[in-house]
Image (spheres, rainbow, N blue to C red):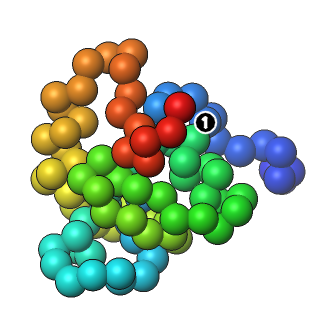
Amino acid sequence: MSTPLESPSLEGTTLTEERLASTDEGDHERFSHYVPKDRIVESAVTGSPVTALCGKKWVPGRDPSKFPVCPECQEIYSGMRPGKPRDPDGSS
């Protein structure tokens, strides 16, 4: 039996996550998006929205493995240099 403190590793810099609620129309609803991992954790604690690499904003809540990765996020992520994570929220 696992305890709440026993969770999957939070190592790395980026997770994929799908949006919970629609804020605008378009194909973004059908994809999972790349978001810095620390933002996903922060959102889980505070309920604040996150911003994907492609600019999509939402409050994470669904299983991203059930959706294909956003092609725009994938393109941006593929072009990023290792060790220099992009912060779409503009902080840090």
Indicate whether 36 appears above or below 85.
Answer: below
Specify the quadrant of the image occupied by residue 90.
Answer: top left
| Residue ID at (31%, 63%) | 56
* In the displayed structure image, the side of residue 37 where residue 74 appears, left or right: left
| Residue ID at (48%, 58%) | 50
Indicate whether 82 appears above or below 15.
Answer: above
* In the displayed structure image, the side of residue 62 where residue 69 appears, left or right: left
Indicate whether 87 appears above or below 79.
Answer: below
| Residue ID at (16%, 74%) | 27
* In the displayed structure image, the side of residue 58 where residue 75 appears, left or right: left
* In the displayed structure image, the side of residue 69 where residue 17 appears, left or right: right
Residue 61 rendering spot, x and y as whole percentages: 52, 70
Specify the quadrant of the image occupied by residue 79.
Answer: top left
In this rendering, does residue 84 appear at all? yes
Residue 78 rendering spot, x and y as whole percentages: 18, 32
Picture mark count: 1
SS assignment at label 1: loop
Mark 1 closeness class: few <14, some 14–19, many ≥20 residues within 10 Å: few
The residue wearing badge 1 is: 10
| Residue ID at (71%, 44%) | 7
Residue 51 rendering spot, x and y as whole percentages: 40, 56
Give the camera-side residue of 88 and 9: 88
Give the camera-side residue of 43 and 16: 43
Q: At label 1, which amino acid type do we have?
A: Leu
In this rendering, does residue 16 appear at all? no
Residue 24 rendering spot, x and y as whole percentages: 27, 81
